[in-house]
Amino acid sequence: MSTYLFVLLTLPENRKIMKRHLQLNIKQLSSCYADGSISPRLVVDYALDDAVKLKQLNAFINLTPEKSLHQAKESDHRYDKKEPLSVLDGVPIAIKDNFCTKDLTTTCASRMLANFVPPYNATVCARLSSAGAVLIGKTNMDQYAMGSGTVDSIYGPTKNVWSPNLNDDKWHIAGGSSGGSATAVAAGICFAAIGSDTGGSTRNPAAYCGVVGLKPTYGLLSRHGLIPLVNSMDVPGIFTRNISDCVDVLNAIAGPDNKDSTTIRRPYTNIELPHYEDIDLRNLKVGIPKEYHCEGLSQDVLDTWMKVADMLEEGGANVKQVSLPNTAASIFVYSILNQCEVASNMARYDGIEYGHRANNDNSTEELYAMTRAEGFNTVVKTRILTGNYFLLRKNYQKYFEKALSVRRLIAQDFRNVFEAPKHSMKNIVDVLLTPTTLTDAPLFSDFVSLSNRDQCARQDFCTQPANMAGIPAISIPIRLSRTGLPIGLQLMSRSLNEEILLRVASWIESQVEFDCLANEQIYAARS
Ligand code: GLN
């Protein structure tokens, strides 16, 4: 770092300005850029500086300072000429390391891709870049997004910013698999971050880290360049500190993409949320699915859930209990389908085209076997083996086809509560309110004493059904638990109903007033 920059960043008045700017939302930050009260370059310098100071959190696999500074300078010029590209121009963001970034390493936190430099950008990254957003770095994750904790990365686990003490060994997990992205936002390094969500990987760490995490409708965002886990469920996810920012990022990246034939062809219309005071809940029907009141749900989470349900009722909404009878089957169905798709997706890593190649020239078979033995961790290998077992001719019907039919039942459960069949007087709801996770963030030491399968079975109970049905879902931070860790709640709605989902989320946000950055420890660590 140059001496000039060092002096600039440590000036107390600049630190104060920066602390204030962190409290802004993206629209307000963009107005400050436009009126010249702060520059993208300064904000990006701070973001990079903070990322280094908060290295102990292990949120990033790689920072991208050269690219960040280049993008920030370009953004400065655009604001000088009064020609910003969008509200995201100059806004520091982070991207999970399973999205391809041109000329920047994309590792999936695996040995297999540790040196993989893609020659192209994922569509989501390209759209953020065309909107002027500034990339700070690629974030940590569970290897190939297989996990719920960000504990299975070859670069080590990510720590939860809200852990009462980051320096002893009693720290809490950030959640996963997009724990690095959630942490980059929760720690105030970036204003937004991109994760992926196949069974909860955006909503789970959002809840644990006290930030907003949106999993949009399947196909609303392009998966082009997102290294696949389960193609039929994967979606890019969005982390922000508030709903307004979430909408701004969604508007920049949503919509059809010729490079991904599974994107919804209908053109995307930008969402504009009214001021929260103008959000009227009187015609809103909110469902409380009784099956989500499940074994393992902590009293703290249950109380929070009921408190927000009461709040919505007092606000004028019609809140009622509904039933999604196949919810409990979700964990098993997800697990079978996940492993089957993993088995086929991972076949591409053979050491020939790209990625790690073992040092073995005895035979092609040995080269494949050794490359894969060295490149993947135990979790990935186990899922490949199990998936191939389910796909054997003798098992295909018993497991894979059966799981597909139960998946349809799970999706039908949602249709039954969201869509009334023609001429029926059936009671339908606009949104469902549920916990995101059963507890607040577990201690790392407790979490890793479980197998990956048990970790997911416990952590993903409330999140996986939405992936199975392809519907949109969001986790909103509500309050701190008795142990001082964030608790989030989830809203779900029918496909392409993001606007209602975000409206209700915005209303809840205005009532609970959760301060994502009320974490003094983090301020102390960076100053
Ligand atoms: N925990 C789930 C799994 O490991 C979900 C992961 C995800 O959403 N990427 O499969």
Image: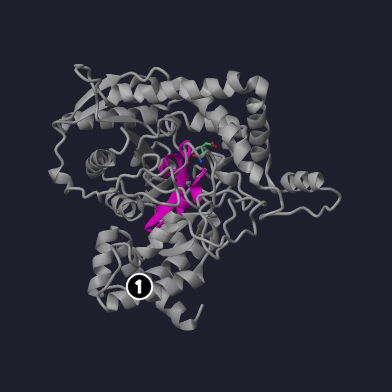
- Where residue 446 appears, x then y in whole percent? 58, 35
Region of the chain picked out in magenta, as a range: 177-206
- Where residue 124 appears, x then y in whole percent? 42, 54
Q: Image quarter for residue 81?
A: bottom left
- Where residue 311 appears, x then y in whole percent? 22, 32
Please say whether residue 175 is visible from this viewpoint.
yes
> Was residue 436 drawn as part of the magenta stretch in this picture?
no
Q: Image quarter for residue 335?
A: top right
Question: Toward the viewer: 364 or 388?
Answer: 364
Q: Is residue 150 left or right of residue 184?
A: right
What residue appears at the point 33 percent right and 28 percent down from the top-left corner? 303
Please say whether residue 448 is visible from this viewpoint.
no
Residue type (three-letter) at the residue carrying disc 1: Ser
Q: Considering only vertical position in the picture, is 414 above or below 230? A: above
Q: Seen from this angle, which residue lies furthest bottom?
A: 4
What residue appears at the point 37 percent right and 58 percent down from the top-left corner? 191
